[in-house]
Image: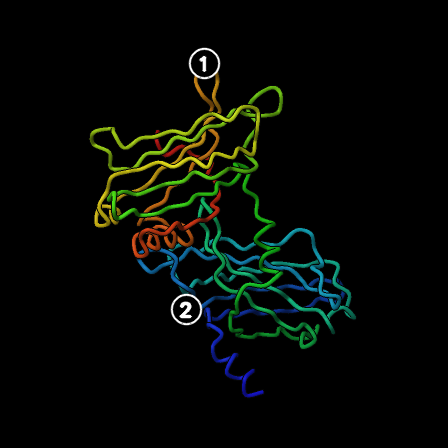
Amino acid sequence: QQQQQQQHCRDPLLGWLEIAISYRESFHSLDCTMVRARDLPAMDAAGLTDPYCKLNIVTPEGHTKYTRWQRTKTVHKTRNPEFNETLQFVGVEPEELGNSLLYVALFDDDKYGHDFLGAAKVCLSTVHSTTQYRISVPLGIEDQYSNEADLSQNWPNGKMLISLCYNTKRRALVVNVKQCINLLAMDNNGSSDPFVKLQLKPDAHKNKKHKTSVKWRTLNPIYNEEFYFEASPHDLNKEMLILTVWDKDLGKSNDFLGSLQLGAQSKGERLQQWLDCIRLPDHFHEKWHALAPDNPTH
C-alpha cells in the first residue's frame, strides 16, 4: 500500500477541472457544465495553451455510451480557461447513473495535432435530479478513453511521419520524410501522386529547399528520404521548417494536399520535437503530425 501511495504521489497533476452536473429525469437528460479549468500544462513557447474539452459517458461495462464525443468551444491562449458551457447527453436512464462515469478529456487546439492536456472522471452516482452537483476534479494522465477521444478527431488531410536530427559534424538539420497516411484523393482514379516540398525559413537566398520523389497512385506514400539544411543550433531557434504535400499533375499545376510547420513557434508535440532535436543532437526524433488544409507558402 505504501508503494501504491508513493506511486500516486509521483503521478503528475495536470491541473484541475470544475464541473457542474444535473439530471432532468423527465427528459432523461444529463446536463454537464464545463465551468473552468486551472493550471493546465503549457503548450507553446509563451507558456500558454488553447484548451477545449471532449466528453462522453463510460458505462459500467467500461465502454463509451455515445459514438460521437461532445466538444466544447476552444478558449484561446490561457492555462486557466473559463468554459462556462453546458453539453447535454440525452437518453440517460435514471438507473444508469449509479455505475456510470462522466469522462472529460482536455486537448490543446492546434491545426497540426490536438495534444492531450489531462482527463477527468466523475462518478454519476452522486448526481440527483433535484440539485446541481458541483465538483472540482484533478486532471490525470492519458488512458484508453482519452485515446478514443483523440481518435474521434477528424484529420481530413491525413498525417505525416517526420524524423528530425541535428547533425553536429555537418552542422545541419537532417529531416527524414518517412511517410504519409490518408492523404486526399485528387485524381479521377480515387488516388493521388504525392510528393513533399521542404523549406527552412527564413530563406533569403531561396537555397534551403528540397523535395521528395513522387509516389504514384497512392494515398499512403512511403518515402524514407533524408534532406540536409545547413544551420547552427542557434539559428534553429529562429527558423521554421515548412513541409507541403502536393499531388503531381503532368501538364498542369500540382494540387495542394496539406501542410505541416515545425519550429520554435510551434506548439505541443511539434514544439517538443523541435526542441528535442536541438537539445539532444545526433539522435533522430520521430513523431506523427496532422496535415493542415491551408497552404503556408502562399
Judged left or right of residue 227, residue 34 is right
Residue 144 lies, in percent from the top left, at 62, 61
* Residue closest to the eye, 115 or 275: 275
Q: Which mark is residue 252?
A: 1
Residue drawn at (29%, 46%), measured in percent from left and top?
Answer: 167
Task: Establish if 184 lies above or below 280.
Answer: above
Q: Secondary structure at mark 2?
A: loop
Judged left or right of residue 185, residue 277 is left
Tell us which disc is closer to us: 1 or 2.
Answer: 1
Judged left or right of residue 91, residue 82 is left
Task: Establish if 42 lies above or below 245.
Answer: below
Task: Residue 181: name its quadrant.
Answer: top right
Residue 252 lies, in percent from the top left, at 45, 14
The residue at which mark 2 appears reads as 39
The C terminus, quarter of image: top left
Name the residue type under label 1. Answer: Lys
Q: Secondary structure at mark 1?
A: loop
Name the residue type under label 2. Answer: Asp
Q: CA gap, disc 1 to disc 2?
A: 51 Å
The N terminus, quarter of image: bottom right
Residue drawn at (24%, 28%), measured in percent from left and top?
Answer: 206
Task: Establish if 124 lies above or below 63.
Answer: below
Residue drawn at (67%, 62%), measured in percent from left and top?
Answer: 57
* Residue closest to the eye, 21 or 50: 50
